[in-house]
Amino acid sequence: MKMEQFNNRNVSENGYYLVDIEDYPTDGWGKFKRVVKRTFRGELFVGLWVVMREMVKFDVHTIQYPQEKMPIGPRYRAMHEMKRLWESDAERCIGCGLCEKICISDCIRMDTKIDENSRKEVSSYTINLGRCIFCGYCAEVCPELAITHGGEYENGSEQREHFIMYEDMLTPIDVMKAGAQVEFEGFGAITPHEDARVKKTPLAY
């Protein structure tokens, strides 16, 4: 019957096809039956059964935050970290200023000075996390792999200066001596087999 009605369709004056697949009820009893038919379907009871089944289970699907935390993916871009050199525990940052120039949020501020050995060193380095959008450009452009994004996403504080000072981002000396500095696997991190991928400069051309 529905196929016959579909084949006997009429074309309106606007060019649209009028298809009468199901007659809409006009009386109250017909409308009530249609509401009941659409409401109490099999899918409704299947969903209720799934909900009741999960309610009586004793499996806990939530974690006790903040005591327990979900693992963070390797490419998650959270609060910044400043790395040290493994050989000398010195700071990797050379004060080139590329991170400050590439920052599209204009939230990085860096000041440098010349030390007693006529070498440039970072005298002031701050990141305004209130403006940062965690795009990862600063970590990607860093030539020394000094700045990376870590997995620490809890940046609540009562002091404005905690957002964020260079000393707070820098890896502590005791962590470096213990060999516990974690290299991030996302933007600005050392990738596996990097030595094999770098092309050596030939001695003669």
Image (spheres, rainbow, N blue to C red):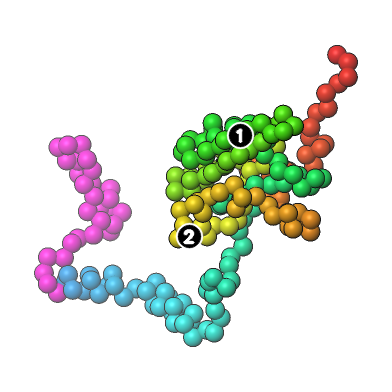
Residue found 12% across the figure and 65% down from its top: 26
> For mark 2, what is the residue?
157
**In the image, residue 175 lies at what x, y percent?**
73, 57
| Magenta stretch, residue numbers | 1-29
Specify the quadrant that holds the N terminus: bottom left
Residue found 54% across the figure and 84% down from its top: 58
Amino acid carrying label 2: it is Ser
The answer to whether one can see residue 186 in this image is no
Q: Which mark is residue 4?
A: none
CA gap between label 2 and label 1 equals 27 Å
Amino acid carrying label 1: it is Thr
Counting other residues with Cα less than 10 Å from the Cα at mark 2, is it few (<14), some (14-19), or many (20 or more)?
A: few
Residue found 86% across the figure and 13% down from its top: 205
Q: Which residue is most to the top?
A: 205
User: In terms of sequence position, does the residue under pointer 2 or pointer 1 come before the other?
Assistant: 1
Q: Determine the image quadrant of residue 172.
A: bottom right
**In the image, residue 111 lies at what x, y percent?**
57, 35
**Residue 163 horizontal side relative to residue 151, left or right:** left
Q: Which residue is most to the front?
A: 116
Vertical placement of residue 161 versus 99, above or below: below
**In the image, residue 34 lies at what x, y percent?**
22, 70
> For mark 1, what is the residue?
112
The answer to which of 32 and 59 lies nearer the viewer is: 59
Vertical placement of residue 118 versus 85, above or below: above
Vertical placement of residue 151 versus 124, above or below: below
